[in-house]
């Protein structure tokens, strides 16, 4: 792994297309005279024929780029595209296919649940551990190269950590809103910019000899890794899915503390700098508290205040576990074969 020296120009972070939809979209975003209408037609056609949206490189990269316009467009983007009607129309087609495949593939518990039972259901869902564990592998068996790959894979979300879930704040009220703000305050450093989890992770990447600029590794991660972040953006940006983004965050927080302890052990075992270990240790205690707030006050509070969101709360939690599980399985399977988990080795 070569240390990153002087940062190249922002244009160098323009991603490589993964198919006709993302290729045309990148052309539009970089100043093509195309007004977006032709791209929208292409996106709608591609959404109809995609065999599996979760693993479709072209579809997931396109969604990733479109959602990126809402977080703050990359420096290589030219023009004001965030609310362009044709891009939104094409995105809607991609989202419909993505959500449809998620709802078809994600295993959701059959049990009917009232509001009072939601916290316990979520704790049962997140307490089930079967099959290989990525965190156990990092703790005991991973090579240094595999540990670096895990940081690269994680960077797609973690350099924007907490941002997708923050879209839900204005869509909640009462107990659930207070709980979400309490969690997010910690995620954003509780008033200390240097302790923002995004910033702590950026320092971890720097200490590991990686490029901490957002988007530096988009080209090398597989579709499933992009799908993990795109799932959060999809749920967070649509008010009708506010229950699902709450369920997603609850599951995410409830499955973080113990794995982060194992990640910390693994990176320390492999001799990484304390700046790398610090990111994971930050989450051990914080997420042990967050899981209670997320399960009982956030998800439980929303279920009580708005019972119609209960099915989506459960779906969002199940989708989080399913998609992140697929990412972990992909990484472990590649390493078991002696291969890189990345599309091209970094």
Image (spheres, grey):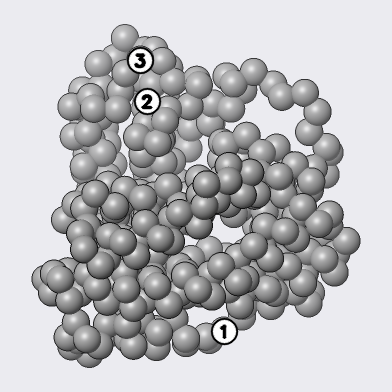
Residue topped by disc 3: 79
Q: Is any atom of residue 62 visible in this view?
A: no
For residue 303, side relative to residue 81 (left or right):
left
Q: Residue at x 21, y 53 (%)?
A: 171
Q: Is any atom of residue 136 visible in this view?
A: yes
Residue topped by disc 1: 131
Task: Find residue 139 and report its horizontal and vertical position in percent.
Answer: 75, 74
Q: Vertical placement of 69 versus 293: above or below?
A: above
Q: Nearer the viewer, residue 279 or 105?
A: 279
Q: Vertical placement of 345 versus 138: above or below?
A: above
Mark 2 or mark 3, earlier in chain: 2
Q: Residue at x 61, y 40 (%)?
A: 217
Total numbered badges shown on the rendered structure: 3
Residue topped by disc 2: 24
SS at badge 2: helix
Q: Specify the farthest residue to the top.
A: 33
SS at badge 3: loop
Pair 1/3: label in front: 3
């Amino acid at each position: 792994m070569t240390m990153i020296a002087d940062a190249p120009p922002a244009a160098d972070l323009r991603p490589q297309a993964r198919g006709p939809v993302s290729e045309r979209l990148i052309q539009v975003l970089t100043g093509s005279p195309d007004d977006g209408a032709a791209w929208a037609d292409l996106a709608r056609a591609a959404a109809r024929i995609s065999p599996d949206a979760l693993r479709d490189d072209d579809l997931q990269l396109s969604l990733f780029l479109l959602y990126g316009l809402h977080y703050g467009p990359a420096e290589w983007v030219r023009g004001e595209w965030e609310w362009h009607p044709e891009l939104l129309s094409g995105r809607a087609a991609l989202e419909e296919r993505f959500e449809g495949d998620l709802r078809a593939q994600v295993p959701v518990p059959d049990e009917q649940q009232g509001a009072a039972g939601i916290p316990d259901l979520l704790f049962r869902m997140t307490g089930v551990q079967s099959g290989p564990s990525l965190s156990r592998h990092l703790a005991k068996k991973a090579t240094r190269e595999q540990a670096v790959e895990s940081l690269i894979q994680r960077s797609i979300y973690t350099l924007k950590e907490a941002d997708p879930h923050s879209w839900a704040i204005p869509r909640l009220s009462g107990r659930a809103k207070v709980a979400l703000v309490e969690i997010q305050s910690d995620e954003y450093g509780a008033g200390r910019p240097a302790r923002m989890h995004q910033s702590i992770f950026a320092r971890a990447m720097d200490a590991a000899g990686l490029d901490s600029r957002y988007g530096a590794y988009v080209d090398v991660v597989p579709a499933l890794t992009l799908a993990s972040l795109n799932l959060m953006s999809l749920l967070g940006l649509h008010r009708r899915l506010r229950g699902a983004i709450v369920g997603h965050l609850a599951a995410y927080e409830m499955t973080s503390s113990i794995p982060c302890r194992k990640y910390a052990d693994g990176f320390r075992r492999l001799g990484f700098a304390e700046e790398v270990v610090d990111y994971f240790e930050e989450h051990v205690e914080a997420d042990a508290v967050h899981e209670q707030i997320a399960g009982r006050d956030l998800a439980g509070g929303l279920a009580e205040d708005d019972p119609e969101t209960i099915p989506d709360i459960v779906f969002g939690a199940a989708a989080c576990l399913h998609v992140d599980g697929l990412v972990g399985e992909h990484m472990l399977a590649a390493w078991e074969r002696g291969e890189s988990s990345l599309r091209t080795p970094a």
